[in-house]
Image (cartoon, grey):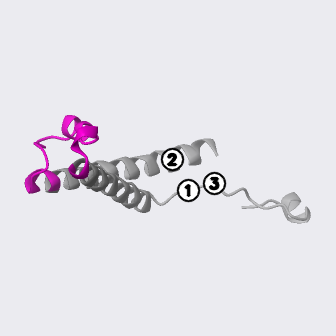
């Protein structure tokens, strides 16, 4: 709530603390991770000698190659990991923004 001196000064307004929508950020990063995974799988199928699919095989659980099971599993993990990262990042940003902003 503004005090009397703030109301007398022209242009004086309460500072707004920046916030982000944690669910929107989570869905955005989930979609980004899933699209990145699918693009790398597609590129790996077109040019397997480049080895762009190897990081996915290393960091995602249960992937064995370019079979349908691995693609579906990798897509699901991309959605979960990206969503988790986005929601957690949004919540932490909002927390620290309120405390420090």
- The relative height of residue 11 versus residue 86 in the rendered view (above or below) is below
Q: Is residue 1 left or right of residue 27?
A: right
Q: Could you tell me how far apart the alpha carbons at marks 3 and 1 are, in whole angstroms?
A: 6 Å
Tag 1 residue: 19
Label 3 CA crowd tier, 10 Å (few <14, some 14–19, many 20+): few
Q: Is residue 63 magenta?
A: yes
Say which quadrant the N terminus sits in: bottom right
Report the span colored magenta: 45-71
Tag of residue 17: 3
Residue 21 visible in rendering: yes
Question: Which residue: 24% across, 52% down?
Answer: 46
Q: Residue at x 36, y 47 (%)?
A: 85
Q: Are marks 3 and 1 in contact (CB under 8 Å)?
A: yes
Q: Are marks 1 and 2 in contact (CB under 8 Å)?
A: yes
Which residue in the structure is indicated by mark 2?
93
Q: CA distance from mark 1 to mark 2?
A: 7 Å
Vertical order, 24 against 60 (above or below) = below
Q: Looking at the picture, how far across and down is residue 36, in whole percent?
A: 34, 52
* Position of residue 26 measured from the top left corner of the image (x, y, whole percent): 38, 56
Q: Position of residue 51 (x, y in %)?
A: 26, 38
In space, the residues marked 2 and 3 are separated at their CA atoms by 11 Å
86 in magenta:
no
Tag 1: Cα neighbours inside 10 Å, few (<14), some, or many (≥20)?
some
Mark 1 or 2, nearer chain start: 1
Of 5 and 17, the residue lying toward us: 17
The vertical placement of 70 against 14, above or below, is above
């Amino acid at each position: 709530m503004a005090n009397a001196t703030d109301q007398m000064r022209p242009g004086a307004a309460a500072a707004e603390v920046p916030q982000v929508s944690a669910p929107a950020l989570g869905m955005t990063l989930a979609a980004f991770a899933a699209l990145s995974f699918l693009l790398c799988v597609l590129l790996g199928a077109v040019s397997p000698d480049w080895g762009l699919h190897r990081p996915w095989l290393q960091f995602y659980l249960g992937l064995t190659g370019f079979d349908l099971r691995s693609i579906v599993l990798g897509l699901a993990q991309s959605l979960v990991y990206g969503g988790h990262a986005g929601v957690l990042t949004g919540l932490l940003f909002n927390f620290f923004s309120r405390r420090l902003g």
